[in-house]
Image (cartoon, coloured by chain):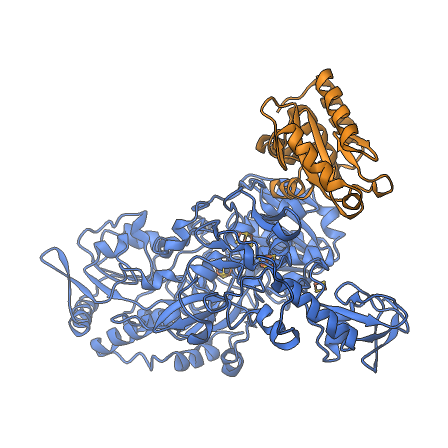
């Protein structure tokens, strides 16, 4: 522990650990020391001189962002000298600033505007011409306007330290200094937009948002990203029923202000012009638009007929639909249609993990835990590509706490650069490779093991046995593909397991078996697109699809029902770590309905009482059925994430490792959904690849 | 890129001065000595130094942009740098610069067509005590007068 020292700020005494930055000590006392370049979590820069403070017995003003507390320091943050210095700094910053606030994207939420408003001088003594250079486009998502840049280096640091990309630098000196991209005139990077987000002024602007709106014209809706399984909170700026931007400046949610390209930009599929807005029914071989009532009646009539005849149903759910929808779907399928032929795209062996962890508490790691874990072992996953938030957390943990990272992957990954040991292991060789790291892993103190689809079935049990043999606390993350892949398992979208991993009496068919079943009468797909890569054995099967777009599967359907996206509905989703969060609808798309409502309407049309289908009521049922989901609804409504362990006991699953395979999405792809995001397809890094990291 | 055996030897020696994970420390000397041989810090040179020191390309680029002694375009065999900062300016630095420009027929950061001379108006070189100062390649010349500069440039032209 470092020693505590007494310091005085603006006449008030306080005690802080020696070495505390003055800017932080002041903040803790409620005293603001204005700053541009200082940014919590990133290296110190002391470039802007906005934070100058006066320290007694020190002849010159000192930057509060790098000055550390020492015994007896007496500091003034509002003395005449300091006030004058701030004015001077701002006058300097403005000397070459275009002051084009009326058209600048940042206007209204600009830190420079705010500082000048609060601390600045109203007049400038500079009469020299301003240096003007034209705006530059570095990528479809990043634009740079050098005259507006105040050279705080925030963007440079967030990209290098935060993302591990290091795509930005500063070229030249003095008044002609400017930020430069790694590809000379363009960026080769993650296209995450973190640099734009962190820029205090309007120097970096976003391709999709720039010059579209004023910030105060939008309403902001905090919801959960619908892409990968990490569960970032994305705050959508909405104007006239259109999503204008995504960010998380308020740092609500498990991701702080982090978002990858998908959470920040790939909401654009919602307004893609191929979005389905009316139900379609096949008439004379062709899909024709019909009314909702006609489509629902067609589905219900067929379902009733097949059910009455004792025919075979197959139901495949989605890894992006809500827990409520998944729960309700399997419940209706099992009780209403009388089938256990229900499944989803399985991307990781969670069931075996939970079975192996039976009887333990604290065996699963949350996203927050990844920031504090002393050691982390990454097995068979390219985190920077597949789980950007988790990669970001581990990197921050390494930066701030020197966490010991280990990678065991088939090819190079970005995490290798910060790993204590990076080992290449091909499929099947992972456990042997991990054995070789035994001593180093045990020395970490505590360990979180994150594994992808390479570890499944028996290998999961062996991994847990290995973790036990280390003699240190070990926690696990079973990496799953999509925003609610976890919820799909927890809610029982499986032929052998119901909600909460409870075994069903007569297990049904798994998804590939349904497709291969020549006697299947009805295939009902809720947000799944299996026919992209498989064929349907029974050409005559009646196919019902609920989706946003006319996917390969929808093209084969007899009835297509237009579904609402995650950004258009209520409900909860569970991330890959098991944290439940609540969605909030940001917009409405005409003609589309939430899957929960569609399933409910089908049940009603069939005359089956499946219970009330509002998200709240279904969630209440989940709370009572699935262990760990019994989180107070108010906690979720307030925007918090609750870590769940949906079972603690043996899981009688039919471990079918051959059915488990990640879809292998990269940073720039997102299954069928990703194909309808113009942004994801427009960046030159798209589609990217796994396990082939090269540093630029 | 391949360099002369002498330069390669020098590069190996410089790289050897730093621990394996601190090779970026060699960025500046490498750029300087490679520039001497190649004549400019071209894009290929930046890539090469980035590669050899394991430093992201953009960070090498930052260094090139920052230091005035690194040039992206070829400079003359003799790079004439005249200081016009305060100390030199007070004792004729500005006149000296204009004199040089006229004599060489080139301006700031320009290179003569024959490639012998290039000219640059520079900021303080730390030679204020002997102002006005001129630096030609790595050599300093103190208390330079227009006449002295003429002699200097003429003699250099002869050697070349
Ligand atoms: S978009 Fe992201 S990866 Fe690209 S330069 Fe900005 S911060 Fe770096
Ligand atoms: S672009 Fe923005 S974040 Fe980057 S240095 Fe300039 S002002 Fe700072
Ligand atoms: S890391 Fe995953 S959850 Fe977060 S923004 Fe990216 S795709 Fe969305
Ligand atoms: S905040 Fe301290 S110098 Fe910029």
Against A488, is B13 above or below?
above
In this image, A458 relative to A527: left or right?
right
Q: Colour of chain A?
A: blue
- Residue A575 is situated, as x and y percent measured from the top left of the image, at 50, 64
Q: Residue at x 60, y 76 (%)?
A: A117
- Residue A340 is situated, as x and y percent measured from the top left of the image, at 34, 64
In this image, A538 relative to A413: left or right?
left
As drawn, the chain in orange is B
Q: Residue at x 76, y 32 (%)?
A: B146
| One can see residue A228 in this view | no
Residue at the farthest left position: A284
Viewport quadrant of the N terminus of chain A: bottom right
Q: Quadrant of residue A46?
A: bottom right
Against A373, is A76 above or below?
below
Residue at the farthest top position: B159
| One can see residue A60 in this view | yes
Viewport quadrant of the C terminus of chain A: top right
- Counting labels gives 0
In this image, A663 relative to B22: left or right?
left
- Residue A66 is situated, as x and y percent measured from the top left of the image, at 77, 63
- Residue A31 is situated, as x and y percent measured from the top left of the image, at 73, 78
In this image, A487 relative to A198: left or right?
left
Q: In terms of depth relative to the viewer, which is nearer, A85 or B149?
A: B149
Q: In terms of depth relative to the viewer, which is nearer, A572 or A299?
A: A572
Q: Quadrant of residue B157?
A: top right
| Image quadrant, ligand 2 | bottom right
């Amino acid at each position: 522990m470092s020693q505590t020292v007494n310091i005085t700020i603006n006449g008030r005494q306080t005690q802080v650990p020696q070495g505390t930055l003055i800017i932080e000590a002041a903040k803790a006392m409620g005293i603001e020391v204005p700053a541009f370049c200082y940014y919590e979590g990133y290296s110190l820069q002391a470039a802007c001189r906005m934070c100058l403070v006066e320290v007694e017995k020190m002849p010159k003003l000192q930057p509060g962002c790098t000055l550390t507390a020492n015994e007896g320091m007496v500091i003034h943050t509002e003395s005449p000298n300091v006030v004058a210095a701030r004015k001077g700094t701002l006058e300097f910053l403005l000397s070459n600033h275009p002051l084009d606030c009326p058209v600048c994207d940042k206007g209204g939420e600009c830190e420079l505007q705010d500082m000048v408003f609060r601390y600045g001088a109203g007049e400038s003594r500079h009469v020299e011409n301003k240096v003007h250079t034209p705006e530059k486009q570095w990528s479809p998502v990043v634009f740079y306007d050098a005259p507006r840049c105040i050279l705080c280096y925030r963007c440079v640091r967030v990209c290098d330290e935060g993302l591990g990309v290091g795509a930005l630098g500063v070229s030249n000196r003095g008044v002609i200094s400017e930020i430069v991209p790694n590809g000379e005139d363009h960026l080769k990077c993650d296209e995450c937009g973190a640099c734009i987000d962190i820029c205090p002024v309007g120097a970096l602007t976003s391709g999709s948002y720039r010059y579209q709106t004023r910030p105060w014209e939008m309403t902001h809706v905090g919801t959960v990203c619908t892409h990968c399984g990490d569960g970032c909170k994305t705050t959508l700026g909405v104007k006239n029923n259109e999503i204008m931007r995504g960010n998380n400046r308020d740092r609500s949610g498990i991701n702080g202000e982090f978002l990858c390209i998908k959470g920040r930009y790939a909401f654009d599929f919602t307004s893609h012009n191929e979005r389905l807005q009316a139900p379609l029914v096949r008439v004379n071989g062709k899909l024709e638009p019909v009314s909702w009532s006609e489509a629902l009646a067609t589905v219900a009539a067929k379902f009733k007929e097949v059910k009455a005849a004792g025919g075979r149903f197959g139901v495949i759910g989605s890894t992006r639909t809500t827990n409520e929808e998944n729960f309700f779907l399997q419940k209706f399928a099992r009780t209403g249609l009388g089938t256990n032929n229900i499944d989803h795209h399985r991307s990781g062996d969670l069931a075996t993990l939970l079975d192996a962890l039976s009887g333990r508490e604290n065996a699963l790691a949350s996203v927050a835990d990844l920031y504090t874990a002393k050691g982390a072992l990454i097995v068979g996953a390219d985190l920077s590509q597949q789980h950007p938030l988790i990669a970001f957390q581990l990197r921050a943990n390494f930066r701030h706490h020197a966490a010991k990272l280990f990678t065991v992957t088939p090819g190079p990954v970005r995490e290798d650069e910060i790993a204590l040991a990076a080992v290449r292991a091909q499929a099947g060789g992972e456990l042997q490779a991990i054995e070789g790291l035994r001593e180093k892993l045990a020395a970490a103190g505590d360990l979180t093991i994150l594994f992808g689809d390479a570890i499944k079935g028996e290998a999961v049990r062996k991994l847990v046995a290995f973790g036990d043999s280390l003699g240190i606390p070990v926690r696990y993350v079973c990496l799953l593909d999509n925003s609610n892949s976890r919820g799909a398992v927890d809610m029982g979208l499986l032929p052998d397991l119901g909600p909460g991993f409870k075994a069903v009496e007569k297990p049904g068919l798994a998804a590939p078996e349904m497709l291969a079943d020549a006697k299947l009468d009805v295939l009902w797909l809720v947000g799944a697109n299996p026919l992209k890569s498989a064929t349907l054995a029974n050409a005559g099967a009646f196919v019902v699809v609920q989706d946003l777009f006319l996917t390969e599967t929808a093209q084969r359907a007899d009835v297509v029902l237009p579904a609402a996206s995650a950004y258009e509905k209520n409900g909860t989703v569970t991330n890959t770590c098991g944290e439940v969060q609540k969605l909030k609808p940001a917009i409405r798309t005409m003609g589309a309905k939430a899957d929960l409502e569609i399933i409910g309407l089908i049940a009603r049309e069939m005359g089956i009482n499946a219970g009330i289908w509002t998200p709240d009521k279904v969630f209440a049922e989940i709370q009572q059925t699935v262990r760990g989901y019994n989180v107070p609804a108010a906690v979720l409504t307030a925007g918090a994430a609750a870590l769940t362990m949906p079972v603690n006991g043996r899981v009688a699953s039919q471990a079918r490792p051959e059915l488990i395979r990640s879809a292998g999405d990269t940073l720039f792809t997102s299954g069928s959904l990703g194909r309808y995001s113009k942004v994801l397809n427009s960046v030159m890094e798209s589609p990217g690849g796994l396990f082939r990291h090269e540093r630029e | 890129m391949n360099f002369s055996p002498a330069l390669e030897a020098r590069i190996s020696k410089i790289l050897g001065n730093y621990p394996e994970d601190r090779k970026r420390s060699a960025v500046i000397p490498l750029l300087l000595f490679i520039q001497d041989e190649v004549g400019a810090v071209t894009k290929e040179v930046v890539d090469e130094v980035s590669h050899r020191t394991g430093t992201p390309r953009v960070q090498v680029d930052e260094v090139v942009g920052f230091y005035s002694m690194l040039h992206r375009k070829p400079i003359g065999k003799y790079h004439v740098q005249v200081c016009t900062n305060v100390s030199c300016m007070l004792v004729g630095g500005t006149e000296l610069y204009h004199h040089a420009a006229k004599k060489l027929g080139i301006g700031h950061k320009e290179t003569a067509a024959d490639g012998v001379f290039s000219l640059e108006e520079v900021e303080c070189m730390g030679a204020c005590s002997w102002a006005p100062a001129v630096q030609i390649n790595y050599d300093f010349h103190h208390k330079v007068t227009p006449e002295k500069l003429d002699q200097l440039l003429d003699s250099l032209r002869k050697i070349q």
